[in-house]
Image: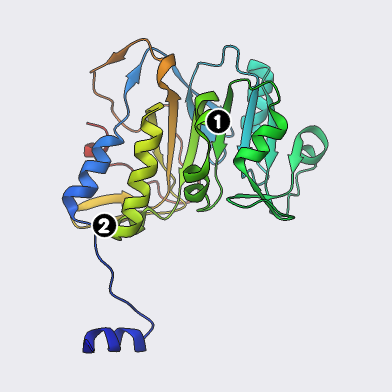
Amino acid sequence: MNITKVLLNHFGRYLEKSTPSKDIFKLIKKMRPVIINKKLIRLGDDNDGGYVVPNDFEDVKFCFSAGVGNLIKFEEDCLKKFNIKSFLCDFNNIKNPRIINHFDFTKKKITSLNNDENLTLNRWIKNKNKNKNEFVLKIDIEGSEYETLLNISDENLEKTRILIVEFHSLRDLRNKAFYQIFNSILDRLLNYFYIVHLHPNNAGKNIKIHDLNIPDLLEVTFVKKNRVKKKTKKQISYPLNIDQKCVLEKEDIFLDPYWYK
């Protein structure tokens, strides 16, 4: 038996197969945002709870927000500015009375199960979107985004106009198994969408993997490919003037240029 493995096991540690730097860099290149013929705007709260999205809401009827906490200005902006009704889902202890009294709120976790505490994204959307309208989908579910995005149906991806996802624990990209899952999810999403915005959440921090800086928490905005009439090769400079750090009292973190150039 390998003595190193024995010692590591004794101290509650283990060896893992690491992801080569070149593979992580290839993934980063896939995630570089494109500039499209739609203006990017900010909806929601200042700092945490605000998101940068393309101004492309014509004929969008609904917003599905999986994981909301007590922040709902994004959903209120959707209603006020674009007449988009929001469905909210969260299992946490929600204290904001407006969420319960003024929104269609479901107290469950979005996961890959359907039971008393859990709900799949597919069932939630099927129950609420009877006429199969296009919708905005916002996902911030503390790590459950991976199983959720693996299980979302092709039909629901087809109906998603704008997709906003906060990806958690990207430090684990150094683990080959996690990298392969993330890469598969990304490839599937890129069949339907363009990435138009990236924003590191400074509630986390930059993690050094090999020679690359990876934000542990990353907000990503996607837009449906068939909504884009024109892309430009002009380079993007980050952060955008409408970006804001999520945690006001913490130092902000930024993407290195290889994420967007």
Q: Nearer the viewer, residue 45 or 115?
A: 115
Residue hosting label 2: 208
* Amino acid carrying mark 1 in the image: Asn
| 65 relative position to 202: left or right | right
Q: Is residue 22 visible?
A: yes
* Amino acid carrying mark 2 in the image: Lys
Q: Is residue 160 visible?
A: no
Q: Nearer the viewer, residue 156 or 240?
A: 156
The answer to whether marks 1 and 2 mark residues whose Cβ atoms lie closer than 8 Å is no
Q: Nearer the viewer, residue 13 or 159?
A: 159
Residue visible at 65% across and 32% down?
73
| Residue 217 at x, y percent in the picture | 42, 49
Q: Which mark is residue 156?
A: 1
| Residue 237 at x, y percent in the picture | 28, 28
- Residue projecting furthest to the right: 101
| 91 relative position to 143: left or right | right
